[in-house]
Image (tube, grey):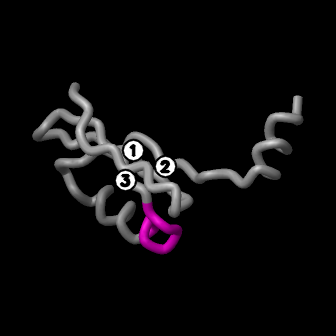
Amino acid sequence: MALGTVDLDPRFNYIIVYKHKDENTLNTWSLPKGSAELNLKLMMDNQNLEVVGVYKKLSNEETVDLLSKK
C-alpha cells in the first residue's frame, strides 16, 4: 500500500482516513463537521473506498482532561 493524498488542514476539526482500493493508497481528508458527516456517508456507500478511521481534533482543554485521566 502506498501513501496517497494527505490533507491535514488545521482549519477543520475532523479527519477521515480511507483506503482507495483501486489505487491501493491510504489517504486523509480534513473537513468541518457537517461536511464530514455527509461525505462519510457517501464514502461508506462507495465500494472502491474503505474508511479506516474518523478522528476529531481535541481542544487543548479536552486533551489535558483526557491525558490526566488514569
Residue 13 rendering spot, x and y as whole percentages: 56, 59
> As drawn, which residue projects farthest toward the left?
22
Residue 27 rendering spot, x and y as whole percentages: 30, 42
Give the mark toward the camera: 3 or 1: 3
Circle 2 is placed at which residue position?
54
Q: Horizontally, is 63 left or right of 26 in the view? A: right
Circle 3 is placed at which residue position?
29
Residue 28 rendering spot, x and y as whole percentages: 36, 46
Give amino acid for label 2. Answer: Val
Dot 3: element: strand
- For residue 2, which quarter of the picture? top left
Decide whether the magenta segment is chiefly helix, strand or loop.
helix
Dot 1: element: strand
Q: Is residue 44 above or below residue 50?
A: below
Q: Which residues are magenta?
A: 31-37
Foreground of the two, 51 or 58: 58
Q: Is residue 51 above or below residue 24?
A: below
Q: Horizontally, is 33 left or right of 44 in the view? A: right
Q: CA distance from mark 3 to mark 1?
A: 7 Å
At x 49%, y 74%, the residue is 34
Residue 70 rendering spot, x and y as whole percentages: 88, 29
Circle 1 is placed at which residue position?
17
User: What's the mark number on residue 70?
Assistant: none
Q: Are marks 1 and 2 in contact (CB under 8 Å)?
A: yes
Q: Quadrant of the N terminus?
A: top left
Give amino acid for label 1. Answer: Val
Q: CA distance from mark 2 to mark 3?
A: 10 Å
Foreground of the two, 51 or 55: 55
At x 40%, y 71%, the residue is 38
Give the mark toward the camera: 2 or 3: 3
Q: CA distance from mark 1 to mark 2?
A: 6 Å
Give amino acid for label 3. Answer: Trp
